[in-house]
Amino acid sequence: MSKTTVNTRTIDHIVHLTPPGTVDEVSEEFRKLGFTVLRGGTHADGLTANALVVLKEGTYIELISFTHPVSYYPPGSAERTAREAHRWAKESPGWIDYAFLGNGESEVGRRVSDAVNKRWTGSVGSGSGDWSGGKEEREALYLEETKGGRVRPDGQILRWLITAPASNDVLGLLPFFCGDVTPRSLRVQTDPPSNTEHPATVQGLAYLRLLVSLSRFEETKRRLAAVIGTYPTPTPGVETQKAIWDLDTALPLVRHPNPQLILEVPSDEEGLSFLASRSGDGPESSQQTGGVGIFEVAFYVEKLGDYPEEGTTPQGRVKFVPVAQS
């Protein structure tokens, strides 16, 4: 299968982490922000549980927490080892990760990992583009697909394949992929229509804003271009330390533009402080080393109404964008 036949630019969901055992609490926080929150379930490994905020165009927010702290599991047990090795085990609460929609393929040559890695390594010929910046040694960006799943509260078993980045230092910058083996409609329940009706009149995802240190900007931009399959959208007047991609959605759009992925180097105190909190250093050093993360997630709404343009949970930053202003 050629690289052009595998879509790797469709946003699937965004992950919001809270402390262990707090799915119910964070669900209530998001209801106060004007979202309808659906019960999710416990994942197949038993380590995490979730709730979902589903949007009309098929994107959703995953409100997730570990079911127990690490100390709950006996030292040396298989459960303790799995808990400590989990992808998000060391992440602080907040917007921690995001997923693109995979294709559920496990056959070599048809997998998402094959398509992205071929772009990055340049092994598909001169038309692949110099995604890796001309480096002689080009390691794979993504690992081979692994099985995942969860059980819904009604007992329905869901199965999917996860395609994860090969390096943990890109967590929250490069997406992982979730490709359904069972029908996606079972995982992302847009029916009945009331599931996607929100008090804040949310219609769909507007943008996902990623912040990165100056030293990592160009490399991250090249990697994202290889993942998405295109270079950033040319935007007149936009500074060079900002890159924007238009993304696809799983379902047709509802009266608003395509969502965007925005990558930028912060220049204000708030952004620098955010990177400092992610790198463990001061604002000045975060501009140069370390420091990466999802700073803000924005949603299109029909109107602001009784809800503010900007809101936060104790762990995350949310913005509402009226459709008429988009």
Image: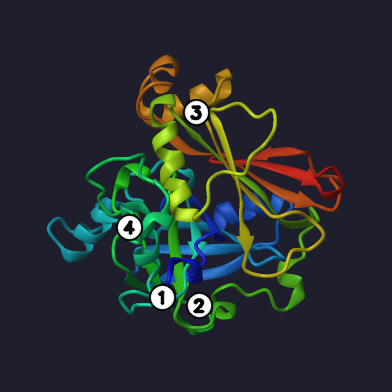
Front residue of 155/309: it is 309
Give the residue pinned by disc 2.
152
Front residue of 141/251: it is 141
Amino acid type, callout 3: Phe
Left or right of residue 137, residue 101 in this image = right
Return the x and y of residue 229 as percentages of the image width and height. Answer: 49, 55
Position of 128 relative to 215 (above/below): below
Label 2 or label 3, whichever comes before in sequence order: 2
Marks 4 and 3, how far apart in space? 27 Å
Label 1 or label 2, whichever comes before in sequence order: 1
Residue 232 is marked as none
Label 1 vs label 3, nearer the camera = 1
Q: Badges 4 and 3: C-beta atoms under 8 Å apart?
A: no
Label 4 vs label 3, nearer the camera = 4
Front residue of 99/263: it is 263
Label 1 or label 3, whichever comes before in sequence order: 1
Label 2 or label 4, whichever comes before in sequence order: 4
Density class for disc 3 (Cα within 10 Å; few <14, some 14-19, many ≥20) is many
Give the residue pinned by disc 3.
274
Amino acid type, callout 2: Arg
Label 4 or label 1, whichever comes before in sequence order: 1
Q: Quadrant of the C terminus?
A: top right
Give the residue pinned by disc 4.
142
